Image (cartoon, rainbow, N blue to C red):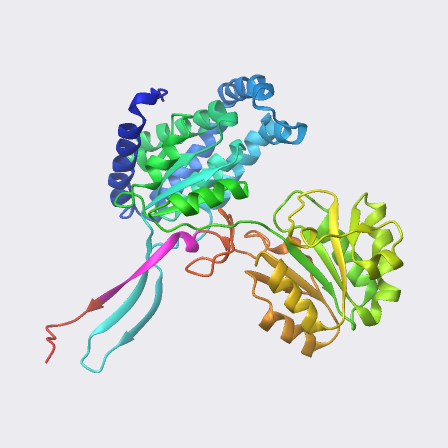
Amino acid sequence: MAVVEERDVREYCQQVARRAKAAAQVLAGVRGEQKNAWLRQSAQALRACQAEILAANQLDLQAAPQFGLSDAQVDRLRLSPARIEEIAAALEEIAALPDPVGEVIESSVRPNGLEVIKVRVPLGVVFFIYESRPNVTADAAAICLKSGNAVILRGGKEAAHSSRAIVDRMRETAAELGLPIDAVQLVATADRDAVGHLLALDELIDVAIPRGGEGLIRRVAAEARMPVIKHFTGNCHVYVDRAADLEMAERILVNSKCQRTGVCNACESLLVHAEVAERALPRLGQALLRQGIEIRGDEATRRLVPAALPATDDDYRTEFLGPVISVKVVESLGDAIEHINQYGSHHTDAIVTGELAAARQFVQSVDSAAVLVNASTRFNDGGQFGLGAEIGISTDKFHARGPCGLKELTSYKYVAYGDGQVRG
């Protein structure tokens, strides 16, 4: 895949989008077993070309210092034989999922005998902008292809060689099977203007999906002329109710915050009902401190957890993505709900309680994509919810909310079957 000269970026983007549109029209009619064969044979191609992919990845690793990547970012960038096997296995897992395209969502027969069917169809062309992890390249391509969509991939320049090696294998496999190779394309320029050019092509691209930092997502949301499936931040809460089992609360809190601190469904804020704060906070605070978590709390929290630092209003709005948590004592369940709806990001929030009425009120009133009762926030994930692979977790309310898997990358159309009916 040749690198594009900067002066040709606008025309190049239009060509990519036009090819994707044409490929999407073909892919919409491809049978499920053909898409599955594409994914399975792509998995085998990745395994067979392991040396080539690792060599490409090495070029990215050598360039990492010039991009100022942290050790954690370099680790996410690095491929190994084991990680390539994981990428290949993920393609096979997506192939094994039910095909959403053509699913009859509902149907009815009208009094005049007209049969009306609501059937699931692909969105069309997906423009996916994402961070620099090579496995995301394969996952996103596979999810889009399985759901019948052509995809334009704009990955981080930090993983350009690795992503290109993966996409080339998938395109070669498509050619071998007689399927549209332009159903998966990787943007071949690092020019930042390319994103803007593509976001203006609403007549060719049906939806944009940004996955990365808040700045990127807000830029895409501001510039895109097509719909955007977005998730800004994951400021997730665990609320310990007055009727909570404290042993359960500790287990859920530690898992929510500490299993992986840098992910979008990690807990960033702890709320504790005032009636149990005297018993709960010293225990929960020590559990967090043992895990190396910095606590920033209100006055009541700092009295009960002397190691806690003062919390600012901004702390309660922050997605830390690291070993820091904000803590507040609330006077009631209603106060907890109000705090979450005001300071949270509508991503994932959990209550720990033994009262069914409290759980019901929390579930009904917390305005988030996922609300959990007596379970870790870390469960808001396509695989954990039984949805299979996901392309991201949406905090939007329209069309797709929460984990975005195969069905969330489809729309629907109505099909009506008659035998000569005309409207009077």
Q: Main secondary structure of the magenta part?
A: strand
**Is 137 on the left-hand or right-hand side of 298?**
left
**Residue occupying image coordinates x 58% and y 61%:** 370
**Is 107 on the left-hand or right-hand side of 267?**
left
Please tell me which residue lies in front, 79 or 77.
77
**Residue occupying image coordinates x 66% and y 64%:** 339
Please tell me which residue lies in front, 174 or 397.
397
Rendered image quadrant of residue 422: bottom left
Q: Is residue 378 magenta?
A: no
Q: Position of residue 258 (x, y in %)?
A: 74, 47
Q: How many discs mark residues in the rendered view?
A: 0
Q: Position of residue 103 (x, y in %)?
A: 35, 60
Residue 293 shows up from this direction: yes
Please tell me which residue lies in front, 174 or 342.
342
Q: Is residue 412 magenta?
A: yes
**Residue occupying image coordinates x 73% and y 73%:** 332
The quarter in which the C terminus is drawn is bottom left
**Is 289 on the left-hand or right-hand side of 170?**
right
Residue 186 shows up from this direction: no
Q: Which residues are magenta?
A: 406-415
Q: Is residue 283 above or below residue 292?
A: below
Q: Position of residue 221 (x, y in %)?
A: 43, 47
Q: Is residue 343 above or below residue 325?
A: below
